[in-house]
Amino acid sequence: MARSLEILIVDDEPRMCTSLEALLQSKNYQVSSVNCGKDALVSLKTTRFALVLLDVHLPDMPGHEILSHIKIQRPDTPVIFITGDTDLDSALSALQNGAYDYIRKPFEPDKLIKTVENALAQGALLREKETIDKQLKLSEERYRYLVQNIPDIIYTLDADGNFTFLSEAVEHLLETKVDDLIGKHYSTIVSEADREKANWFFNERRSGKRISSGLELRLKVAGKTPSTSQKDRFVTVELKSVGIYEAVPPDGKKQLVGTHGVIRDIHERKQLQTQLHSAQRMEALGTLAGGIAHDFNNLLMGIQGRSALMAMDLDDDHPHGEHLSAIDDYIRSAKELTNQLLGFARGGKYEVKPIDINELVHSTATMFGRTRKEISIHIKTHDEAIVLEADHRQIEQVLINLFMNAWQAMPDGGELYLGTEIAIPNDEFCMAYKMEPGSYARVSVTDTGIGMDTKIQARIFDPFFTTKEKNRGTGLGLASVYGIIKNHGGVITVSSEKGQGSTFNIYLPVSEKSADRDIPLNGEIAKGSETILLVDDEDMILDVGQAMLQKLGYRVIVANSGNEAVEIVQRMGTKINLVLLDMVMPVMGGGEVYDRIQQICPQMRVILSSGYTIDGQAQLIMQRGCNGFIQKPFNLSELSQKIRQQLNGREGSG
């Protein structure tokens, strides 16, 4: 069987070439031969020979020159020189220059074959070494690439805790050069508060009995001073390490010679956890606030209704009129407070419809600026209308609260910059704030006021948290802003520095619909004589509501449950002209009652009434065709005109 290795013979004597070829072929070697140096160099370029038998003297160039070419081009190819007795010095010189061996003419066949076999074995070892060296080089390059490009810090420490290696990620994370840390103790980058547990973690490795698998630490960022905020001075990391040991005679016990490990930045993970905990806390507070606001609104409804009825029975000059007017003012203030609670709570959206945020920003800023002459307002809105599906009043309240917050942050006056644009948040932003991907309207409110530190920013949206003096705020303004935006499927962010002003960015989903136009209420009391079914599970609301409707001239039928309301509609049908339906009731809620009414009398006009909605239920019913919505507590004028809008066949604003 022929061997795969090929041998090149270079000799200008034909008989020598023939003799060598015959001998080597008899041992199943593949053989090629040339008779000059020029042909040898050509063959060596095109073929990878396992061995070269080279004559010392050739007619066109000396053998050692060919040897030099071989050592450059094929360093793993062994060369055996063929020489006469008189050329021994040349052969010895060739050995010094890298030849494997030499044989003298005339050669002994067995000795030549043995020399060839040894040379081929050495060549195989050289080729194997070359392969291993290449693999090692590739492995080192791959390791170096991975170590220097992964975001985690790879490090090694000696037995004393001094850095012996650090990957370049440390320069990005801690803003410190690698060379500045090599030879330094690990404690130089650990916050003082965490050094004790870092020392315990390192010394634990000395025993070789590891208990802990990882450690969370705060590391110092270079260039940060004690005057820098706590958030900026440190970065939170997770550290995992393994001890390096060697056995020491005579007892053979393991001795720590160092550690190597990985430092991972978990700052963003901690932020996400904080945001999650904050969202859960906000959700719990929102549920509580919504329940309080709902019950409070029912009480206000009773007070406002009775006050309105009393006022209608008084002459214009009656002395009690002034007191009733004051009561109405107090009710309006209380209603604003509950609106803020509802805005913060779940279900704080009241009446969702398409609105142009550009128009709302302009109109709200114009109204606000009339009484705040010390502030210069600058508005830059998107070139085209940006339509949202939102509650007009709620978003207006958001803007007013943000404007008020900015005004209070600029006691000596300043600049207020307002802007709108279309934004498409990236995946990281959407994941952090649990947003659906897509197009959003970004509304920015920037002031040049006193700014906030990070501690205040962390609590700025908490209900009842305020930095204002006593009696100058409830602490619900920004909490309601947060709740309203969240309930509209949006996000609000804040960025601020002490003395550098603040910027609030609101993100709200963009709608493909066209903006609606409101039909304003004129404040007058409109009466009628039709039949109205009033549905509510609160006896107080039924009593005052019935009295108000009767005062307006209507024939009133009351039902204190959803089941009773459905039975009345089944019995009376189209004799009922309109249903005033409470949204939240036990057993059969307003949504189910509406659906049952539509099955019985598809043309029946229905106005929903509630202090708040749950999980967007009201807007879903409105989308199914419900005619209008009125928020408790409502006054006599508002109620009368809402009813006339429906009975006169006008859709209005609901």
Image (cartoon, helix red, strand yellow):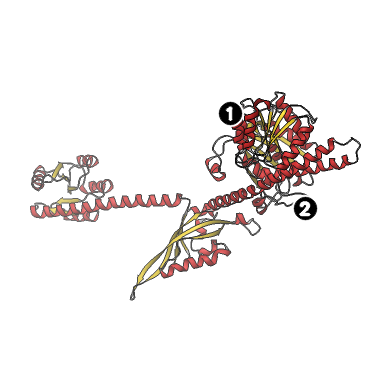
Q: CA distance from mark 2 to mark 1?
A: 56 Å
Q: Is residue 423 above or below residue 227?
A: above
Q: Residue 244: where, in percent of width, then height? A: 40, 65
Who's the residue at 20% across and 54% down the image? 122
Q: Which numbered disc, 2 or 1, marks the residue closer to the eye?
A: 1
Q: How many other residues sit within 10 Å of disc 2, few (<14), some (14-19) or many (≥20)?
A: few
Between disc 2 and disc 1, whose residue precedes? 2
Residue at the spot of label 1: 599
Q: Position of residue 522 (x, y in %)?
A: 78, 29
Please tell me whether residue 38 is drawn above or below residue 178 in the rendered image. above
User: Which residue matches tag 2?
Assistant: 469
Going by the image, does 523 lie left or right of 173? right
Q: How many marks?
A: 2
Work out which residue is located at the far front of the displayed protein and give it: 571
User: Horizontally, is 92 left or right of 185 in the view?
Assistant: left
* Residue type pointed to by label 1: Gln
